[in-house]
Amino acid sequence: MKARSLLILAAAAGTLAACSTTGGRLPPTEVIRYHLGEPIARGTIRVEPLSSTGPASIEFKTYAAAVETALLRNGYALPQGDAQPDYIATVAFTRANRLGPPRPSPFSIGLGGGSFSGGRGGGVGLGGGLSLPIGKSRPQEIIGTELSVQIKRRMDQSPIWEGSARNMAPVETLAKIDAPSQAAKLANALFTGFPGESGRTIEVK
């Protein structure tokens, strides 16, 4: 999927502090979608990884299943038997974490630059230093996760819709939430109000 830069996330220190103490509650998700401004046709669809090298990881399959569920909820259907689908949805996700130096409050959180993939199908950059001061000197590690999807016609491979959803949360928070719940939150946010306003960044709680 064509990589697109999302806007820099900015949050008050109090907001992130609340995220770290909500016992497993994920923070809001930032979403942006792109399309041609025309009605998005429905039909049969198949979910595939952006990259086809190597076997799909269990984690990738979890995110792909969440995307498939969101697509079915928005009017698409799975092809029956050996039938070819009308559309292909390519899925990629990345995850990055980095412990940065303590920063005074308020501070900004930047996502961009280096990245590494959390599973087969990576390709959208997500990285940078994310830190939340605790007291005066001890930062807290934050993990950023991004889910990206592109829908294209199978016949000519022309894209009709694409979007990305990303959020960030302290490591301790993510440890309390199972992978299917994390994947469902990103997929549900990405397809909120599908197809959405092209080029507009929204925040989904």
Image (tube, rainbow, N blue to C red):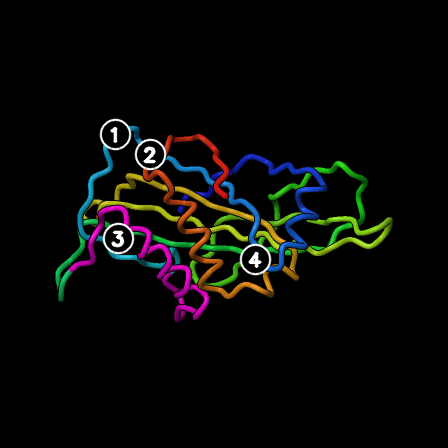
Badge 2 vs badge 3, beta-carbon distance below 8 Å: no
Up the image or down, 52 lies above or below 42; here it is below
Question: In this image, 38 relative to 18: left or right?
Answer: left
Q: Distance between the residues labelled 4 and 2?
A: 27 Å
Q: Which residue occupies the foreground of this view, 71 or 33?
A: 71
| Mark earlier in primary sequence (4, 2) | 2
Q: How far apart are marks 4 and 1 (CA)?
A: 34 Å
**Disc 2 element:** strand
Q: Where is residue 201 in the image (x, y as percent from the top left)?
A: 48, 33
Q: Mark 4 points at which residue?
A: 116
**Disc 4 element:** loop
Badge 2 vs badge 1, beta-carbon distance below 8 Å: yes
Q: Mark 3 points at which residue?
A: 72
Q: Which residue occupies the foreground of this view, 96 or 169?
A: 169
Q: Mark 2 points at which residue?
A: 35
- Amino acid, disc 1: Glu
* Magenta region, residue range: 52-79
Q: Position of residue 58 (x, y in %)?
A: 43, 70
